[in-house]
Image (cartoon, grey):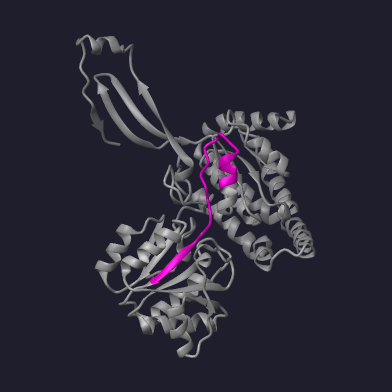
């Protein structure tokens, strides 16, 4: 392994211990200082981002990826307000989760603590770097960041501002953040299982699987977003149309955008209203034979749909339309083809919604609202480091709580197990409040 990379990992590891011991007020002051510094340095950030965009366009990168790459006034405002919102949130670490008397004079306390050192490999969005850094700082985690090569100039400026403020303010855990710039460094990072506690890859299923196959470090995969909107037989047609358009078009490149519109065979009006609204919003429809026949009879075009399309994350204004003969058929389809991200039922039937909630195996299961709500900021988490489609140890948008573990603190006065084994003392196991 490259000695410089190893030294970087050891520096971040040592910083993680100091960071875990910082007070909430210290971390909040740095969050606010970073927000101010980003605003003060926006000219340099925008210059670097312009260079990244021009290079990406010259390389023929897809338009939706160029959109993700852009870091403008709006995104600057969003990330700085996000940092300030994090500074207002309660301290996620040092929280007492449980307090119990094990025996007279022997007190156990379960307290929240950071995971330690987190390696995050993310896509081309430079704003993700700021969001991830802010969440890790607030939760007391040191972080190794690797963004897409197409955003390297922007990410480098953002990183220099964050690390510069860490040094300028005298923050006691300098070295808590590092930026990796090459694929070779990623390969070396995956070997540092003695220094890194968790890897969070954000990307395709194939990418996440590659990371899992090439490291002994625990991996929390943020894989693809194959999300569904199911129009039940009692779906309100106007609501179905609004939700379909929002779930598909509000930000089609996002992982929580819906890819398939499932429709109960008896929800004819909802089908036509939703598809007409999608077409008017510029969405290309790909439909199964039954759905295609109905749409064409109503004067709407739709391309033929293949089974492979059900597992495709388009990231664009394309949507599948599939008719089902029952709610159970819709649920079976979602559990088979979905990525366990976010799925929604549109229905006025509370029993149907309860059935959907119970049987759909996804991190987010909704009724009558857009799948685009699957987001750490919208959930009130401040932001998210990723969305976990697995079940251990965090699920869904991974905010501050998902970046925390816990430890047990035991306070005694010379207590020995032999006293209990010999019957001289007895366990009380009394839970304490507060």
**15 in relation to 220, above or below:** above
In the image, 95 versus 429, the foreground residue is 429
Q: Where is the C terminus found, in terms of image quarters?
A: top left
In the image, 181 versus 310, the foreground residue is 310
Q: Where is the N terminus found, in terms of image quarters?
A: top right
Apparent side of residue 65 relative to residue 91 in the rendered image (left or right): right
On the image, which quarter does residue 110 sit in?
A: top left
Q: Position of residue 404 (x, y in %)?
A: 46, 40
**401 in relation to 9, above or below:** below
Q: Is residue 293 visible?
A: yes
Q: Which residues are magenta?
A: 209-230
Is residue 105 inside the magenta stretch?
no
On the image, which quarter does residue 345 sit in?
A: bottom left
Is residue 213 inside the magenta stretch?
yes
**141 in relation to 57, above or below:** above
Q: Position of residue 351 (x, y in %)?
A: 24, 67
Q: Position of residue 347 (x, y in %)?
A: 32, 73
What is the number of callouts on the image?
A: 0
Q: Is residue 201 visible?
A: no
Q: Position of residue 389 (x, y in %)?
A: 46, 52
In the image, 353 versus 68, the foreground residue is 353
Residue drawn 63% across the image and 56% down it: 127
């Amino acid at each position: 392994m490259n000695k410089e990379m190893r030294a970087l990992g050891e520096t971040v590891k040592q910083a993680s211990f100091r960071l875990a011991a910082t007070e909430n007020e210290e971390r909040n002051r740095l969050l606010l200082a970073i927000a101010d510094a980003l605003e003060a340095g926006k000219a340099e950030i925008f210059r670097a981002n312009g260079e990244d965009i021009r290079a990406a366009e010259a390389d023929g990168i897809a338009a939706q990826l160029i959109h993700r790459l852009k870091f403008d006034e709006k995104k600057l405002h969003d990330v700085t307000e996000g940092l300030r919102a994090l500074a207002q949130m309660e301290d996620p670490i040092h929280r007492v989760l449980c307090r119990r008397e094990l025996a007279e004079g022997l007190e156990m306390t379960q307290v929240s603590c950071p995971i330690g050192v987190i390696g995050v490999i993310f896509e081309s969005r430079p704003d993700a770097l700021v969001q991830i850094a802010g969440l890790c700082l607030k939760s007391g985690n040191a972080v190794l960041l690797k963004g897409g090569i197409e955003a390297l100039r922007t990410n480098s400026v953002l990183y220099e501002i964050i690390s510069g403020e860490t040094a300028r303010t005298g923050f006691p855990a300098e070295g808590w953040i590092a930026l990796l710039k090459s694929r070779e460094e990623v390969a070396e990072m995956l070997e540092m299982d003695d220094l890194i506690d968790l890897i969070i890859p954000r990307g395709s299923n194939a990418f996440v699987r590659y990371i899992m196959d090439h490291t002994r470090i625990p991996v929390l995969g943020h894989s693809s977003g194959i999300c569904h909107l199911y129009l039940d037989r009692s779906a309100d047609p106007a609501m179905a149309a609004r939700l379909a358009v929002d779930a598909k078009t509000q930000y089609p490149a996002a992982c929580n955008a819906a890819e398939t519109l499932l429709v109960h065979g008896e929800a004819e009006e909802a089908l036509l209203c939703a598809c007409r609204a999608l077409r008017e919003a510029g969405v290309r429809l790909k439909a199964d034979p039954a759905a295609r026949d109905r749409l064409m009879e109503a004067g709407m075009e739709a391309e033929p749909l293949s089974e492979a399309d059900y597992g495709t994350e388009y990231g664009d204004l394309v949507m599948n339309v599939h008719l089902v003969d029952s709610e159970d058929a819709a649920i079976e389809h979602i559990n088979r083809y979905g990525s366990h991200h976010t799925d929604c039922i549109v229905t006025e039937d509370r029993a149907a919604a309860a059935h959907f909630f119970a049987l759909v195996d996804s991190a987010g299961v909704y009724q009558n609202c857009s799948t685009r709500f699957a987001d750490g900021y919208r959930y009130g988490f401040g932001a998210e480091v990723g969305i976990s489609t697995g079940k251990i140890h965090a699920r869904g948008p991974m905010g501050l709580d998902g970046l925390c573990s816990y430890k047990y603190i035991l306070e005694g006065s010379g207590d020995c197990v032999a006293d209990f084994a010999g019957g001289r003392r007895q366990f009380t196991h009394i839970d304490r409040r507060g």
